[in-house]
Amino acid sequence: MTNASVGFQCPECVAEGRASVRPKRSRLGARVPTRPYVTFVLVGLCVVAFAWEFMAGTQPVVEDWGLWPVGVAGLDEYYRLVTAMFLHVSLLHIGFNMLVLWMLGPQLENILGHVRFAALYLVAGLGGSVASFWFSSPNGVSVGASGAVFGLMGAYVVVGKALRTDISQVVGLIAINVVLGFVIPSTDWRAHLGGLLTGAVVGAIMAYAPARGRIPLQVLGTVVVLVVLVVLIVTRDAAVTRDLVSVGVDTGQYA
């Protein structure tokens, strides 16, 4: 028997009572997580990748796994569009990105839930990679979680606006970092803006989907964003490949 407010209850009664309690949900309909496990995993992956770079050498790891447009288009190494967002070139680089992820991640994960938050982060990161792929030098290499992190900032502003919470500090953070992206050399501001825009769009899909049919609409909207990104990748891939062929580079692709 189990102690109750009045008398005792059998274990079966306690179990039935717990099963009947509905899980707590956020204002956007997501099940409120007990802990921000996705944020923990994302930070952990970036830290592990940075440790790997430290042991194996930053340059070879970045060359093999960073976002290199020639590698993506000429060698069909599309994985670079994703792996690049987990690599960093310095302690300051990873430190800033992980700080912002640690600040905003748990709040957004609490509002969106594990799955929606993970989708937001990865799609925003891919959006940053696509922008870099499109507008950076084909022979340059870009790495960093900044695109995904800017995506979180963009989503935070949109979601916060929908929920009528204070977003002034994050808006200020975005403004400062957009300016720094143009001032500090070697900063991939293209990835920043691409991630920011993609994150804001996905955030709007999550925040403004009507309660009726919310989950299907959120899934559909996110899939549409992914399809647009894939189309942009294919289009840019073809353009870079043509440029490589025109200058006599063997891409290994033959009709």
Image (tube, rainbow, N blue to C red):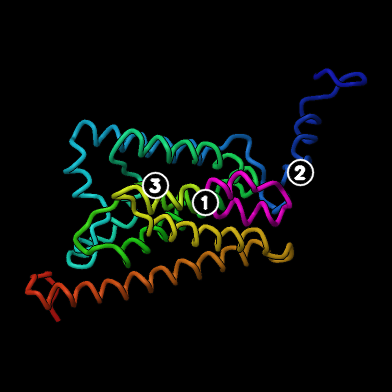
Residue 235: image location, x then y, percent: 32, 76
Determine the residue positioned at 45% across, 53% down: 122
Residue 136: image location, x then y, percent: 29, 62
Q: Nearer the viewer, mark 1 or mark 2?
A: 1
Q: Magenta span covers which residues?
A: 154-173
Residue 200: image location, x then y, percent: 55, 59
Determine the residue positioned at 18% across, 35% down: 56
Judging by the rendered image, the residue that carries numbered circle 1 is 175
Cα gap from disc 1 to disc 2, whole angstroms: 41 Å
- Helix, strand or loop for the magenta stretch, by majority: helix
- Is 226 placed left or right of 242 in the picture? right
Quadrant of residue 70 in the image?
Answer: bottom left
Q: Earlier in the sequence, mark 2 or mark 3?
A: 2
Q: Residues within 10 Å of mark 2 (few under 14, many from 20)?
A: few
C-beta proximity under 8 Å, tags 1 and 2: no
Where residue 145 is drawn, which disc sits there?
3
Nearer to us in this view, 187 or 128:
187
Determine the residue positioned at 28% across, 61% down: 78
Judging by the rendered image, the residue that carries numbered circle 2 is 22
Nearer to us in this view, 121 or 181:
181
What residue type is disc 3 on?
Ala
- Circle 2 SS class: loop
- Is 189 placed left or right of 149 in the picture? left
In the rendered image, which quarter contains the C terminus? bottom left
Q: Earlier in the sequence, mark 3 or mark 1?
A: 3
Cα gap from disc 3 to disc 1, whole angstroms: 18 Å
Residue 58: image location, x then y, percent: 21, 39
C-beta proximity under 8 Å, tags 3 and 1: no
